[in-house]
Image: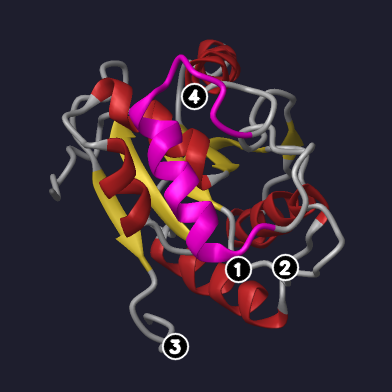
Amino acid sequence: MTVILRENVQKLILVRHSLPEKIVGVPAKEWHLSAEGRYRSHLLAQKLANYQPAIIATSTEPKAIETAQIIAQKFDKSVEVVGGLHEHDRSNLSFVEEKKFIETLAAFFATPDELVMGLETATQAYQRFQQAVENIIAKTPNGDVIIVTHGTVMTLFIANFTAEEPFHFWQQLENPMAIVLPLPDFKSLEMITIKSRQIDV
């Protein structure tokens, strides 16, 4: 679903971090961007050039901070690292094979009040993330709000305000991509993706 938003509407732009360099034995929350991930971040920054962010916030995770820094360069702005924007807490899990991870994540979305994986239920992760987002919006009365974060918590937030089915929506996400939601009701969305290696000019 793509909705063209009016220019004078303040927007929340949720950005999923770019492609990390996955290192077995290193927790995902400590991963940094790969060279391709940095390149893709520049592509996404180009796609966001027409927005007017008053703040660019990011989670505490390196791959999100690095994505935010590249986007911020486009707007000549600083980056604000904010607690509560991190991914669903899976810090107690070791590296999980992709097929098993996807199967478990489907159950995570389907049973939000059960502790299916990690240290948070889906409901707990959503509530923590929502509060952090609301705090940022509350202190930003004018201009767009860019928040660089993670796929699972983005999905939980968006599914709460739209008709999107969480697991199906999560499967559509790319590294990186942006979801644009109008404030204050979040009732429609626009998806901004990187479709090629050609920078728009």
| x and y, in percent, of residue 7 in the image | 23, 40
Q: Are marks 4 and 3 in contact (CB under 8 Å)?
A: no
List the residue tagged with mark 4: 122
In the picture, the quarter occupied by the C terminus is bottom left
Question: Badge 1 local density, few (<14 within 10 Å), some, or many (20+)?
Answer: many
- Name the foreground residue: 29 vs 200: 29
Residue 100 belongs to the span the image colors magenta = yes
List the residue tagged with mark 1: 19
Specify the farthest residue to the bottom: 198
Find the distance from the CA under tag 2 to the CA under tag 3. 17 Å
Which residue lies at the image location 26% right of the left edge and 29% below the top edge? 9
Find the distance from the CA under tag 1 to the CA under tag 4. 23 Å
> In this orientation, does residue 11 appear?
no
- Name the foreground residue: 149 vs 71: 149
Q: Secondary structure at mark 3?
A: loop
Which residue lies at the image location 60% right of the left edge and 58% below the top edge? 71
Q: Is residue 39 above or below residue 124?
A: below
List the residue tagged with mark 3: 197
Question: Badge 2 local density, few (<14 within 10 Å), some, or many (20+)?
Answer: many
Looking at marks 1 and 4 on the same chain, the residue that comes earlier in the sequence is marked by 1
Find the distance from the CA under tag 4 to the CA under tag 2. 26 Å
List the residue tagged with mark 2: 33
For marks 1 and 4, give the one nearer the viewer.
Answer: 4
Q: Are marks 1 and 2 in contact (CB under 8 Å)?
A: yes
Residue type beneath disc 2:
Leu
Which residue lies at the image location 14% right of the left edge and 46% below the top edge? 4
Looking at marks 2 and 3 on the same chain, the residue that comes earlier in the sequence is marked by 2
Find the distance from the CA under tag 1 to the CA under tag 3. 14 Å
